[in-house]
Image (cartoon, helix red, strand yellow):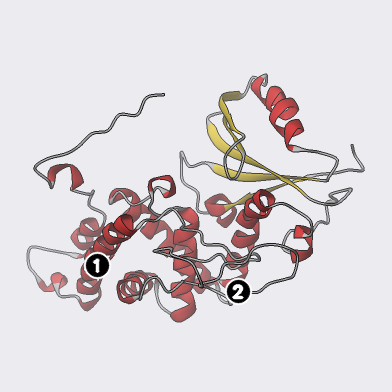
Amino acid sequence: AEAAGGKLYTSGSYRLGIHEPGADIDTVCVTPSVCDKEDFFTDLKDQLQNHPDVTNLNSIETAAVPVITFDWEDVNIDLLFAKLNVISVPDTLDIDNDLILRGVDRPTATTLNGPRVTNMLANLMQGTKERYAAFLTVIRCVRRWAKKRGLYSNKMGYWGGININILAAFTVQIYPNASPSNLLQKFFMVLKNWKWPNPIMLTKTHDSQLGQIVWASQGNKEHFPILTPAYPSMNSSMSISKQSRIIIQEEINRADAICTRMIKGEEAKSSDNNDGHMWAELFEPSDFFINYPHYLAIVIAG
């Protein structure tokens, strides 16, 4: 077992250092070929289930990306499984090397995309401390805005953390020297004027000839493609529908108008307004539940 090895990798906001209280930690368990999914969802699951510090454990084996989710001392962890086509996983494993994907199945490639994309985002945003700090600040602001406006749920057809991270990095690539406040305004301005369904991409897609499917525009009918930069490039926002794209776009237009006024200082000149109020307006909760005369509630029971 010692020779076979294995490694744990984190991704997303925790890996970038911008996780918030109550947020989950996305973790990938990388194993050699001697381990399989049954070991992960039986032996490891049983060990976790019987651990005194583990609560609320749930395993989803049939998901596109199989996962065990649980709370460890009240910290939520999403633990994913990735089996490489190698006999051992040493401590020196380079997860960013495309060759580790040789011979793996699609769920494994999708699982490994998490830490590989996060690492690439961190590398692409390097340059100056100010630039990287502005990148993280914009992510925090956009994530807070999306949660307040009811747009933060990939499962519900809106944005998830990876989408916001890629979009923030894309804005930094266009405006590498902008201050955080200007960068936030540029974020919404860029998306307001973007011609969907043209894809957002940080790097050109490439095929490393390792048998993985790489995203291509031909034949795709996706509404809001935000491509992951690591091989194999995938659309990180496949769950966004035509209708949810319209809702996201309306909110982007609203946010752009607020940030534009903020930057121009038009509202700051008003005697009954100030900068703090302007930022508060951006983060006001959605008025969805008071904005319509009628609502339809659907209850699904199984």
Q: Amino acid at mark 1?
A: Asn
* Viewer can see residue 72: no
Quarter of the picture holding the C terminus: top left
* Eye-nearest disc, 2 or 1: 2
Helix, strand or loop status at disc 1: helix
Vertical relation: 136 (above or below) 128: above
Please tell me in which quadrant of the rendered image residue 198 appears: bottom left
Q: Which residue: 22% across, 49% down?
A: 286
Q: Which residue: 18% across, 48% down?
A: 287
Q: Which residue is mark 1?
A: 253
Say how many tags the image has: 2
Helix, strand or loop status at disc 2: loop
Q: Which residue: 74% across, 65% down?
A: 98
Quarter of the picture holding the N terminus: top right
Please tell me in which quadrant of the rendered image residue 72 appears: top right
Q: Amino acid at mark 2?
A: Thr
Where residue 195 appears, x then y in whole percent?
A: 35, 76
Q: CA distance from mark 2 to mark 1?
A: 29 Å
The label shown at residue 205 is 2
Is residue 296 toward the left or the right of residue 9 in the image? left
Please tell me in which quadrant of the rendered image residue 40 appears: top right
Is residue 248 toward the left or the right of residue 30 in the image? left
Q: Nearer the viewer, residue 159 or 48?
A: 159
Instruction: Sort mark 1 into few (<14), some (14-19) or many (20+) by Cα contacts within 10 Å.
Output: some
Instruction: Sort mark 2 into few (<14), some (14-19) or many (20+) by Cα contacts within 10 Å.
Output: some
Vertical relation: 95 (above or below) 57: below
Where residue 125 appears, x then y in whole percent?
A: 56, 71
The label shown at residue 236 is none
* Viewer can see residue 127: yes
Instruction: State which tag comes first along the sequence, 2 or 1.
Output: 2
Where residue 291 appears, x then y in whole percent?
A: 13, 47
